[in-house]
């Protein structure tokens, strides 16, 4: 069976701006239809501003999502355009 849903992606920084690891980010790619996803470390230049899809969450909720990839993908799938 072939899924015809679009593939989506999201990147986020896991290090603070002053850190030498600031350009090392987590990147997710997933299919909304078949729920298959991949996560990897990606390079994002310091000058590139990333959209923070978790900005509206309380710190506790944000931390909880970042600990569970499948929950993060579910959240992103429902809250990103």
Image (spheres, rainbow, N blue to C red):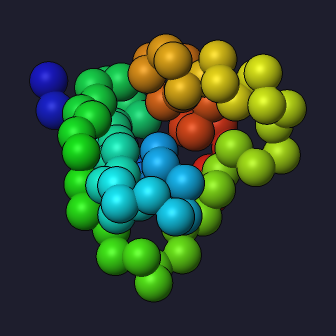
Kindly identify the residue that appears in the image at 51 percent across and 18 percent down. 67
User: Which one is nearer the viewer's eye here, 18 or 13?
Assistant: 18
Q: Nearer the viewer, residue 47 or 21?
A: 21
Q: In which quadrant of the rendered view does residue 51 lie? A: bottom right
Residue 58: x, y in percent?
A: 85, 32
Residue 57 image position (x, y, % from top left): 81, 37
Q: Is residue 6 visible?
A: no
Q: Is 73 located above or below residue 51 in the figure? A: above
Q: Name above or below for residue 63 compared with residue 81.
A: above
- Decide if residue 26 is on the left or right side of residue 52: left
Out of 70 and 26, give the one closest to the viewer: 26
| Quarter residue 49 falls in | bottom right
Image coordinates of residue 5 in percent, x first then y, are 35, 44
Residue in view at x 78 percent, y 21 percent = 60
Q: Quadrant of residue 76?
A: top right
Quarter of the image that includes the N terminus: top left
């Amino acid at each position: 069976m072939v899924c015809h849903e679009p593939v989506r992606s999201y990147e986020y920084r896991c290090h603070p701006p002053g850190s030498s690891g600031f350009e090392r980010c987590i990147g997710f790619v997933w299919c909304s239809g078949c729920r298959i996803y991949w996560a990897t470390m990606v390079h994002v230049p310091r000058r590139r501003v990333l959209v923070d899809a978790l900005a509206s969450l309380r710190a506790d909720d944000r931390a909880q999502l970042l600990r569970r990839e499948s929950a993060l993908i579910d959240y992103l799938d429902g809250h990103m355009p």
